[in-house]
Image (tube, rainbow, N blue to C red):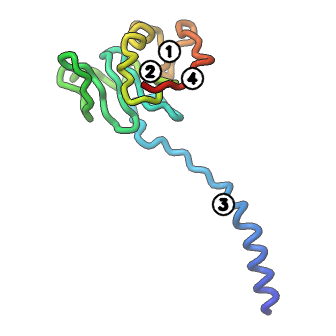
């Protein structure tokens, strides 16, 4: 009887670790329902209101009197802005804490652009991003 129990434990030890490795959970914590899916990007750029959204801290970043403000809500001047329908751009290759340090480039690249169905810039208007590396400020 002891041999059967020991044999059973050995079989369990051999079978259970491989099963543990089969479990995979993919959760986009912090990704808002209005934003396109993301893998490891930290920010969205909202070209219609020239603002940003920090995915990790769930805060909007917008310009007010020449100062970039972080807030959980957009200011009243954007009350008619519909996040579900407006353009949202993922900012790849940026890992810093101040996406607005590249504001002039984002404004030039993404404002008044054609967007495809997943609300990313369409390939016909988008510059090639191959070879770009993540950068911090």
72 in relation to 85, above or below = below
Q: Earlier in the sequence, mark 4 or mark 1?
A: 1
Measure the C-alpha gap from mark 3 to mark 4: 34 Å
- Mark 4 near mark 1, Cβ–Cβ under 8 Å? no
Is 70 on the left-hand or right-hand side of 47? left
Q: Could you tell me residue 80's position as x and y percent? A: 23, 20
- Mark 1 near mark 3, Cβ–Cβ under 8 Å? no
Depth check: give the residue in front, 107 or 119: 107
Binning the other alpha carbons within 10 Å of mark 3 as few (below 14), some (14 to 19) or many (20 upward) gives few
- Can you identify the residue that label 3 sits on? 20
Residue in the picture at 22% in, 20% down: 67
Residue furthest to the front = 137
- Mark 1 near mark 2, Cβ–Cβ under 8 Å? yes
Depth check: give the residue in front, 104 or 74: 104
Location of the N terminus (image quadrant): bottom right
- Can you identify the residue that label 1 sits on? 121
Q: Earlier in the sequence, mark 2 or mark 4?
A: 2
- Can you identify the residue that label 2 sits on? 89
- Can you identify the residue that label 4 sits on? 133
């Amino acid at each position: 009887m002891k041999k059967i129990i020991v044999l059973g434990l050995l079989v369990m030890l051999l079978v259970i670790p491989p099963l543990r490795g089969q479990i995979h959970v993919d959760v986009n914590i912090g990704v808002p329902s209005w934003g396109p899916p993301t893998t490891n990007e930290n920010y969205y750029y909202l070209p219609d209101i020239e603002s940003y959204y920090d995915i990790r801290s769930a805060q909007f970043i917008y310009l007010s009197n020449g100062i970039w403000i972080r807030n959980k809500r957009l200011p009243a001047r954007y009350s008619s802005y519909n996040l579900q329908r407006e353009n949202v751009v993922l900012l790849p290759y940026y890992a810093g804490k101040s996406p607005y340090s590249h504001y002039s480039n984002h404004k030039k690249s993404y404002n008044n652009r054609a967007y495809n169905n997943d609300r990313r810039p369409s390939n016909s208007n988008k510059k090639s991003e191959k070879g770009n590396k993540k950068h911090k400020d």
